[in-house]
């Protein structure tokens, strides 16, 4: 099985085996949690419950507390490589979005959140080399996400816009901002998921575009402490 990771053909299992996971830092090295390669392999497991648990662990352990570890960049490469796999269409409720959606949408969301974590401030939430490794693959995240901007599934489409938009803080990708302003307006600003609507306003304000009104704060949404721009859901960036 060969899957395109945005930089050419890559076998995800080769990527998994090529990394010396014992030499990179993990969130929970004590053995009390699944190891990163176990989590990644679980994403393509035959058991859909195992897959859903792997997505949960991807968000809670590989990028625990929005932190970046030595294992994060190689894990992201694996996720990019499997996006086109048929098993990523397993349906479930993932992260803070209460809608049932394909796992592919959740993986794109995770990649977008990772891109934001790596670029949110100058230093990034982790050791400099680990943050730099994630920043180095932002073009891969962007290219992988753009493959799904016109996906037939609207939930995959909006996750792809989110993932690609979050990479545009990288100087080498900022040239794409003008073409993403209408996409963010039409896709994220109108999402049923309040988290995406706040991300839309954050992007548009940051890019100097007219953001439009904030969503109704009474509508349920993600934990406001989960993403830095959503802290308190204020009316002005950084939210």
Image (cartoon, rainbow, N blue to C red):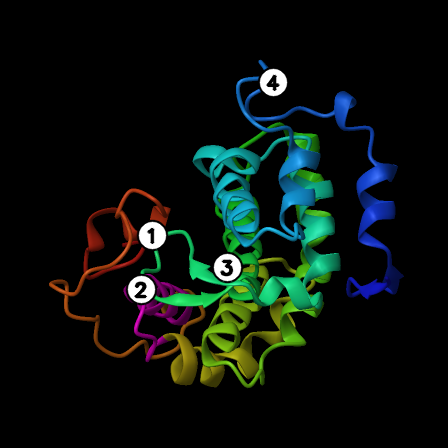
| Neighbour tally class for label 2: few under 14, some 14-19, many 20 plus, Cα within 10 Å | many
Callout 2 secondary element: helix
Q: Earlier in the sequence, mark 4 or mark 1?
A: 4
CA distance separating discs 4 and 1: 29 Å
- What residue is shown with label 2? 198
Per the image, label 4 sits on a secondary structure element best described as loop
Q: Is residue 99 magenta?
A: no
The residue lying furthest to the left in this view is: 218
Mark 4 or 2, closer to the camera: 4
Numbered circle sitting on residue 29: 4
Query: In the picture provided, is 16 more to the left or to the right than 50?
Result: right
Check disc 3 and report the residue beneath it.
106
Question: Which residue sits at x=64%, y=44%?
Answer: 42
Horizontal side of residue 155 vs 34, given as left or right: left
Gap between marks 2 and 1, in whole Å?
A: 8 Å
User: CB under 8 Å between callouts 3 and 1?
Assistant: no
Are the residues at dot 4 and dot 1 in contact (C-beta closer than 8 Å)?
no
First in residue order: circle 4 vs circle 2:
4
> Dots 3 and 4: beta carbons under 8 Å?
no
Q: Earlier in the sequence, mark 3 or mark 1?
A: 3
Measured as percent of width and height from the top left, residue 12 is found at 80, 52
Q: Which residues are magenta?
A: 189-204
Q: In the depicted view, which residue is nearer to us: 19 or 85?
A: 85
């Amino acid at each position: 099985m060969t899957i395109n990771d945005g930089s050419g053909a890559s076998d995800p299992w080769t990527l998994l085996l090529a990394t010396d996971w014992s030499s990179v830092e993990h969130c929970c090295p004590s053995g009390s949690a699944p190891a990163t390669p176990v989590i990644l392999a679980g994403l393509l497991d035959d058991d859909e419950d195992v897959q859903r648990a792997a997505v949960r662990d991807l968000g809670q352990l590989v990028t625990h507390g929005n932190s970046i570890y030595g294992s994060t960049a190689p894990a992201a490469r694996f996720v990019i490589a499997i996006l086109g796999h048929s098993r990523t269409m397993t349906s479930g409720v993932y992260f803070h979005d209460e809608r049932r959606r394909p796992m592919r949408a959740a993986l794109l969301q995770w990649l977008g959140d990772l891109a934001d974590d790596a670029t949110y401030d100058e230093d990034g939430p982790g050791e400099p080399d680990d943050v730099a490794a994630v920043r180095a693959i932002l073009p891969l995240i962007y290219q992988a996400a753009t493959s799904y901007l016109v996906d037939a599934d609207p939930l995959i489409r909006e996750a792809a816009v989110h993932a690609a938009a979050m990479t545009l803080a990288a100087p080498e990708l900022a040239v794409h901002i003008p073409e993403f302003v209408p996409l963010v307006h039409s896709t994220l600003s109108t999402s049923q998921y309040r988290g995406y609507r706040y991300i839309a306003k954050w992007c548009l304000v940051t890019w100097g575009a007219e953001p439009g009104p904030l969503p109704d704060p009474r509508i349920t949404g993600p934990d406001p402490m989960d993403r830095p721009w959503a802290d308190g859901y204020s009316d002005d960036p950084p939210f």
